[in-house]
Amino acid sequence: MKQNVATREKMLAQINKAYPKLFTKTTEEFDGGKGGIWSSGESGVTAKDGCRLFNYYAEGNKYDIGVHNEIGKLLEKNGWYAEWYDCGTIMFWLI
C-alpha cells in the first residue's frame, strides 16, 4: 500500500486543525534547517485522552520516544516523523 505523503504546508494545516493551540513554525525560523516543522515539547497541549502530546521522559504504551501515539500516528500516516531537538523542542520531518 502506497503511503500518503503530505507537503509541509498540508502537514502544518492538519496539525493546526487537530491541535489549534500547538505552537508550530518552520524549521527555517528556528535554525535555518530546511523543510521541517518546529514545535514546542513543553506546550502542555493534550491528546484526546488528556495526556500531553509531548513528554520527553514518557515511556509506555501511550508514547513512542516521548511522542503521544495520537500525534505520532497523524504524522506517520502523512509520511512524517517527530524528532526531539532537546527536551523542550521537537521537530517534524518527512520520512
Image: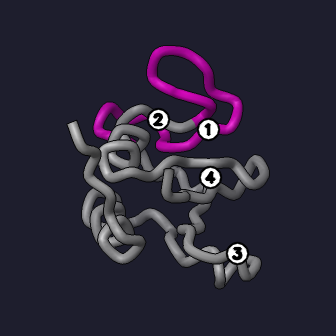
Residue found 64% across the figure and 55% down from its top: 90
Precedes in sequence: disc 1 or disc 2 = 1
Task: Look at mark 2 in the image and give the residue it sits on.
Answer: 68
Q: What amino acid type should be assigned to the residue bearing mark 3?
A: Gly
Q: Mark 4 packing: few (<14 Cα in 10 Å), some, or many (20+)?
A: many
Q: Which residues are magenta?
A: 47-66
Q: Amino acid at mark 1?
A: Asn
Q: Is residue 94 above or below residue 33?
A: above
Q: Which mark is residue 41?
A: 4
Point out the tag, 2 or 3, that comes first from the N-terminus.
3
Residue under the point 63% across and 27% down:
58
Q: Is the N terminus in the top left, top right, bottom left or bottom right quadrant?
A: top left
State the CA–CA distance, disc 2 to disc 3. Answer: 24 Å
> Which mark is first along the chain, 1 or 3?
3
| N-terminal label among 4 and 1 | 4
Q: Secondary structure at mark 1?
A: loop
* Contact flag, marks 3 and 1 (Cβ < 8 Å): no
Q: Which mark is residue 55?
A: 1
Q: Which mark is residue 33?
A: 3
Give the residue type at disc 4.
Gly
Discs 1, 2 touching: Cβ within 8 Å? yes
